[in-house]
Structure formats: C-alpha cells, structure tokens
Image (cartoon, rainbow, N blue to C red):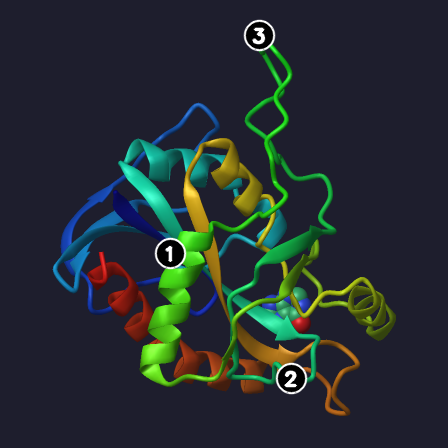
Amino acid sequence: MSWGIIGGTGLNQMPGLELLGREAVSTPWGEPSASLVRGRLQGQEVVFLARHGEPHRIPPHRVNYRANLWAMQAAGVTRIVAVNAVGGIDPAMPPGHFCIPDDLIDYTWGRDMTFFEDSLDAVVHIDFTHPYTLRVREALLNALQAAGLAYSATGVYAATQGPRLETAAEVRRLRNDGCHIVGMTGMPEAALARELGLDYACLALVVNAAAGMDEQPISMAAIEAVMAAGMDQVRDILGQVVSAG
Ligand code: HPA
C-alpha cells in the first residue's frame, strides 16, 4: 500500500522528503517525465514524480502519461495523490482555494490515453463512472479539514488541451457543462490510473480565476505568487495524508 505523489506545476520537487533514492525507470510506453524519487515523508515511504519533468520542461500535451503511471506501479505504488494547479470557474473557488474533485470532463484530444489498444485478447472498457477513488479523496478531505484550509469537497474538473489558456467563451461553455475548475493535466492521467487498478485522487489548488471570470487579465506573476504560498500548504496536506496510513 505504497503512496505515490505526482507533482504538477509548482511542485517539481518535494522538500521535506527524506531522500532514499532516485530511479530512472524505462517502461514499454517510453520514458517517464523524470526519475522517480523514493523518499520518506512523515515516516512513510512515498514515491514522487514530477509530471512536467525536473526541471519543469514538458508541456501538458507532451507528458507521457502512460509511462508515468506505468513507472509508478512498477515502483510498487498502489495509491496516488495527483497535485494539479487549476483555474477557478466557480466564483466560490477563488485563487488559493483547494478542491478535491469528484468528477471530470475530458476535453483533451490526440493524447495517448489508454493501455488497451494493441495486441489485445479482448476489448477492455473500464468503469469510469466515478473517476476518483473515494478513500483517497476522503484522506485528502480529512487533511484539509484538520489544516483549517478553505476547500470544496466536490467539484467537476475540466481537462483542457493547452498549452494555451482558454478563451472566455470556452470557459462559459465549461461552466454551462457543469465544470468548477479547469486544468490541462487531469486527463488521461486519471483514466490510466484506473486502467492499472491504482487508487487515485486529485488535490487541486486554484491559482487563477479562469479566463473571463475576472476583469483582470491572467497574470503569470499573480499565479506564481498564489502557487508559492499554496504549495507549502500542499506539502503539509500530503504529509498528513501519508502519515494517516
Ligand atoms: N486553465 C487551464 N489550466 C490551468 C489554468 C487555467 O486557467 N490555471 C492553471 N492551470
């Protein structure tokens, strides 16, 4: 029952992790984004992977999600917290707010999004009714509650293609579709985790108001400031989650 952490933008490294080793893994699907970092967090062994590479260099549509998930499982990981910086669509989710989504809509295209396409004995259709694993979501919610942070316990994550941000009309559409937050890396990661039978949930930190939801243009400087503060809290939450067992 080993924990894996996939760190997104703002979390390429995991300070506070007592380093046990680094493993360069190659998989039948190619190379993962970075070496896996094996370490101890709050006394528990965890495996950390920087989704965009270390240093951050792989854009969302170029991440080898299949290799990343395969490598995590090969390293003995059975449950994953995926950390994602997102835009807030719901006005109740301003910058600095956390969300543990319970559902998602996939707007990405052209990504390698399944392990089940070649050399199959039979066609496979995973059940993806509830894309995030309840017990991992609950562990995150307990940690957020204990830390006294502002969060939403549910939400629909819109996975967009990127790497550009959305237009105002696209965000209006996402809102009409019932989405609360928007990011570029939530899919196919969640589906691939399910295909491998891994428990998986998303810890989303809102770093900006989604396009058109605020009068201000989206500023990278403002995003980085929110991210710097929020990622310290993310580290505390992750420590709490893994130490809870
Ligand atoms: N849109 C898509 N992805 C994002 C955003 C956004 O507004 N903010 C951070 N990741």
* Callouts 3 and 1 close, C-beta under 8 Å: no
Give the left or right position of residue 96, taking residue 1 as reference.
right
Q: Residue 116: name its quadrant.
A: top right
Tell me if mark 1 has few (under 14), some (14-19) or many (20+) residues whose alpha carbon lies within 10 angstroms of its own: some
Please tell me in which quarter of the rendered image ligand 1 is found: bottom right
Q: Nearer the viewer, residue 12 or 231?
A: 231
The residue wearing badge 3 is 121
What type is the residue that disc 2 sits on? Ala
**Based on the displayed image, in which of its 4 quarters is residue 88 positioned?**
bottom right
Dividing the image into 4 quarters, which one contains the N terminus?
top left
Query: Where 168 falls versus 92 (above or below)?
Result: above
Residue 26 coordinates in the image, percent (x, y): 36, 30
Residue type at numbered disc 1: Glu
Q: Residue at x 55, y 85 (%)?
A: 221
The residue most toward the top is: 121
Of pointers 3 and 1, the one earlier in the residue sequence: 1
Marks 3 and 1, how far apart at CA: 37 Å
Badge 2 density bin: few <14, some 14–19, many ≥20, Cα 10 Å: few
Residue 94 spot, x, y in % from top left? 60, 85
Q: Quadrant of residue 230?
A: bottom left
Question: According to the image, label 2 marks what residue?
Answer: 92
Q: SS at mark 1?
A: loop
Helix, strand or loop status at disc 3: loop
Identify which residue is drawn at 62% across, 66% down.
155
Q: Which residue is mark 1?
A: 54
